[in-house]
Image: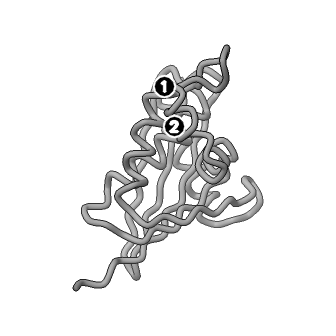
């Protein structure tokens, strides 16, 4: 049996205006190897970009991995750790009887991708000197400016 690869993934999203032009940045690290991924959209929200950073990072993994995901997004971390996203899905993408869950298209993809890996989530305080978070933020802001 092959050893499962241990990967660190750092993510961040940014948006100028909310909604407005946005971007995301992701850093994948496996041993000495590092891959940086980024992109953006002309009209989006910060939360959508936070989720896109996770999606793009997980999609880049071509086999099952043990992934430590570092994010400053409470929206992402709490929705997974507290089971909210799975509950929204089981309730037909409703947060409660009256409110629709936001971004069900991205949450559907996030949940599907998370099932393919052994994932541990780590919340990091944004804009607080965490080197990889700062780099992901820089990449995300750079991408968002392409649409301004």
Q: Residue furthest top?
A: 98
Q: Which residue is mark 1?
A: 147
SS class, disc 1: loop
SS class, disc 2: strand
Q: Is residue 124 above or below residue 1?
A: above
Q: Position of residue 134 (x, y in %)?
A: 64, 57
Evaluate if marks 2 and 1 touch, with contact meaning CB atoms under 8 Å apart.
Answer: yes
Q: In front: mark 2 or mark 1?
A: 2
Q: Residue furthest left?
A: 1
Q: Nearer the viewer, residue 111 or 72?
A: 111
Image disc number at residue 21 = none
- Residue drawn at point x = 31 percent, y = 66 percent: 64
Q: Position of residue 60 (x, y in %)?
A: 31, 56
Q: Position of residue 66 (x, y in %)?
A: 42, 71
Image disc number at residue 23 = 2
Q: Is residue 28 above or below residue 94?
A: below
Q: Is residue 1 above or below residue 123?
A: below
Q: Is residue 11 above or below residue 42?
A: below
Disc 2 from disc 1: Cα separation: 9 Å
Q: Quadrant of residue 21?
A: top right
Q: Position of residue 19 (x, y in %)?
A: 61, 20
- Residue drawn at point x = 60 percent, y = 38 percent: 14
Quadrant in which the C terminus is drawn: top right
- Residue drawn at point x = 66 percent, y = 49 percent: 82
Image label count = 2
Quadrant in which the N terminus is drawn: bottom left
Q: Quadrant of residue 102?
A: top right
Q: Residues within 10 Å of mark 2 (few under 14, many from 20)?
A: many
- Residue drawn at point x = 60 percent, y = 34 percent: 47
């Amino acid at each position: 049996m092959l050893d499962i690869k241990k990967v660190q993934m750092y993510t961040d999203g940014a948006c100028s205006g909310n909604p407005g032009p946005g971007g995301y940045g992701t850093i994948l690290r496996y041993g000495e190897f590092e891959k940086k991924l980024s992109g953006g959209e002309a009209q989006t929200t910060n939360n959508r970009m936070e989720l896109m950073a996770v999606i793009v990072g997980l999609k880049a993994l071509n086999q099952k991995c043990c992934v430590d995901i570092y994010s400053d997004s409470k929206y992402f971390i709490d929705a997974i750790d507290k089971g909210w996203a799975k509950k929204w899905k089981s309730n037909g993408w409703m947060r409660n009887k009256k409110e629709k869950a936001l971004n069900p298209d991205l949450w559907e993809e996030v949940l599907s991708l998370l099932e393919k890996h052994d994932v541990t989530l780590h919340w990091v305080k944004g804009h607080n000197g965490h080197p990889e978070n700062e780099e992901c933020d820089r990449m995300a802001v750079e991408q968002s400016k392409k649409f301004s």
